[in-house]
Image: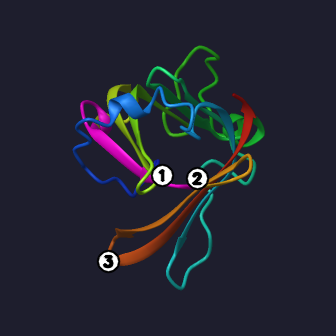
């Protein structure tokens, strides 16, 4: 089974007092975003696309502070190694987590307090992501360590609704 990290640059940070910023109309995260690119590139290595080169997924941020993140491989790639039972869950090609979030414009970052996930280590944790927004493009780009190597992670999303 392949192992990968959904959004590997987790920082466990307290965000006391930031919840009121979610309802702020200046919160650029509010809306629905589709994933366009999800790639991890080890230093000196070739890019790895854990969800294929055309991933599917939605990141949904509500104005009242809820978030839902869902990612999967494109169906042609997923179907090739899926269990023949159409009702079976295949966690190595679908990842999801949800909870509440706070937005901190000083980073800018958002922190998700995870209440549900099919990623065991995320349950009950806080996941912080640093991001940039250019128009309707959300870019998450950071590095993390894996097996003694530095990996560059890039997630590119496109806004589809506010």
N-term-proximal mark, 2 vs 3: 2
Compared across the picture, whether 8 is left or right of 11 comes to right
Quarter of the image for residue 61 reads: top right
N-term-proximal mark, 2 vs 1: 1
Compared across the picture, whether 10 is left or right of 109 comes to left
Residue name at image x 66 percent, y 41 percent: 73
User: Dot 3 corresponds to which residue?
Assistant: 148
Between residues 126 and 17, which one lies in front from this camera angle?
A: 17
Q: In the structure shown, which secondary structural element does the residue marked by tag 3 occupy?
A: loop
Determine whether 68 is above or below 17 in the image: above
Q: Position of residue 58 (x, y in %)?
A: 63, 32
Contact check, label 2 and label 1, Cβ < 8 Å? yes
Q: CA distance from mark 2 to mark 1?
A: 8 Å
N-term-proximal mark, 3 vs 1: 1
Number of dots carrying numbers: 3
Quarter of the image for residue 130 reads: bottom left
User: Dot 2 corresponds to which residue?
Assistant: 50
Residue name at image x 53 percent, y 23 percent: 62
Compared across the picture, whether 14 is left or right of 50 comes to left
Q: CA distance from mark 3 to mark 1?
A: 18 Å
Q: Position of residue 143 (x, y in %)?
A: 44, 69
Where does the C terminus fall, quadrant-wise?
Answer: top right
Q: What range is drawn magenta here?
A: 121-132
User: Dot 1 corresponds to which residue?
Assistant: 2
Furthest residue in direction top, as rendered: 87
Q: Position of residue 21 (x, y in %)?
A: 41, 34
Q: In the structure shown, which secondary structural element does the residue marked by tag 2 occupy?
A: loop
Residue name at image x 34 percent, y 44 percent: 127
Q: In the structure shown, which secondary structural element does the residue marked by tag 1 occupy?
A: loop
Contact check, label 2 and label 3, Cβ < 8 Å? no
């Amino acid at each position: 089974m392949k192992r990968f990290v959904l959004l590997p640059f987790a920082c466990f940070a307290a965000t006391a007092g930031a919840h009121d910023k979610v309802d702020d109309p200046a919160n650029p995260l509010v809306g629905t975003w589709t994933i366009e690119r999800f790639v991890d590139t080890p230093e000196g290595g070739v890019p790895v696309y854990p969800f294929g080169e055309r991933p599917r997924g939605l990141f949904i941020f509500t104005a009242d502070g809820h978030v839902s993140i869902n990612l999967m491989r494109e169906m042609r790639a997923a179907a090739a190694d899926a269990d023949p039972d159409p009702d079976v869950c295949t966690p190595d090609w679908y990842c999801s987590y949800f909870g509440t979030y706070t937005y901190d414009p000083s980073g800018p970052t958002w922190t998700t307090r995870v209440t549900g996930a099919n990623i065991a280590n995320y349950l009950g944790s806080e996941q912080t992501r640093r991001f940039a927004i250019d128009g309707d493009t959300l870019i998450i780009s950071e590095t993390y360590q894996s097996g003694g190597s530095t990996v560059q992670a890039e997630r590119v999303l496109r806004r589809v609704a506010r």
